[in-house]
Each structure stands twice: as C-alpha cells, then as structure tokens.
Amino acid sequence: MKLNENYIVHIDGGETLLVPTAEASFSGIVRGNKTLGLILELLEQEITRDEIVRTLSDRFESEDGEIENDVDSVLKRLREIGAVDD
C-alpha cells in the first residue's frame, strides 16, 4: 500500500496534517500526532501493514497489541477517506 498522490503531508512541530489536493474525493484536514506523521512518512513508499507495525515496534515501547491496533485504526481511517492506495 502507499499514500495516495492526491494527499500532502505537513509536519509542524508535534502536529501532523494530512491535506487533500483538489483532485482528492475528501475535503477536510486530518490532524494527528508524531505517530501519525511516522505512519504517513512510511506510506510515501510502497509498504505493508506488517512492515509499519514492525517499524513502530522498533521505535516505541507499548502494551501487547497496542501498536497493531493503532496502525489498523489509522489505516482504516485513511482508507475511508481515500488517502491510501492498496
């Protein structure tokens, strides 16, 4: 999967913004934290869900299943707005 080319990522300090271009079907702005920023950064290249989970697991300590749940939640939302191409 990969981030759809009709979306632009902007990271400003601790806040991440995902902004659609005029060609995107979604209109609005997605706001998130540094973790969302890292996921979106990883999605700039073709990557799998498991590779995203593995990268986040290497960088962050968490409870069992927490990273997987967070990644699944983010990917679900990104798919709903058309921001991810599978």
Image (cartoon, grey):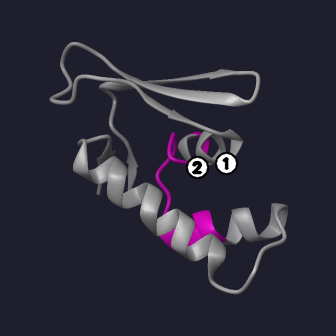
- Amino acid tagged 2: Ile
Q: Residue at x 76, y 22 (%)?
A: 13
Q: Position of residue 1 (x, y in %)?
A: 38, 56
For residue 15, above or below residue 50: above
Establish if 38 lies above or below 49: above
Nearer to us in this view, 73 or 20: 73
Quarter in which the C terminus is drawn:
bottom left
Graded by Cα atoms within 10 Å as few (under 14), some (14 to 19) or many (20 or more), the crowding at tag 1 reads some
Q: Which residue has dot 2 on it?
A: 39
Q: Is residue 69 magenta?
A: no
- Indicate whether residue 45 is drawn in magenta: yes
Write the start and end of the magenta stretch as one range: 41-53
Residue 22's image quarter? top left
Picture coordinates of residue 47, whole percent (x, y): 50, 58
Q: Say what secondary structure mark 2 lies in.
A: helix
Q: Amino acid at mark 1?
A: Thr
Pointer 1 with pointer 2, Cβ within 8 A: yes
Q: Quadrant of residue 40?
A: top right
Disc sitting over residue 71 in the figure:
none
Which mark identifies residue 35? 1
Kindly identify the residue that appears in the image at 30 percent across and 23 percent down. Answer: 28
Element carrying mark 1: helix
Q: Is residue 2 above or below residue 18?
A: below
Residue 48 drawn at (x, y percent): 48, 66
Above or below, 54 against 43 in this view is below
**Could you tell me which residue is drawn at 34 percent across and 52 percent down?**
77
Left/right of residue 47 with respect to residue 14 in the rendered view: left
> Dot 2, crowdedness within 10 Å: few (<14), some or many (≥20)?
some
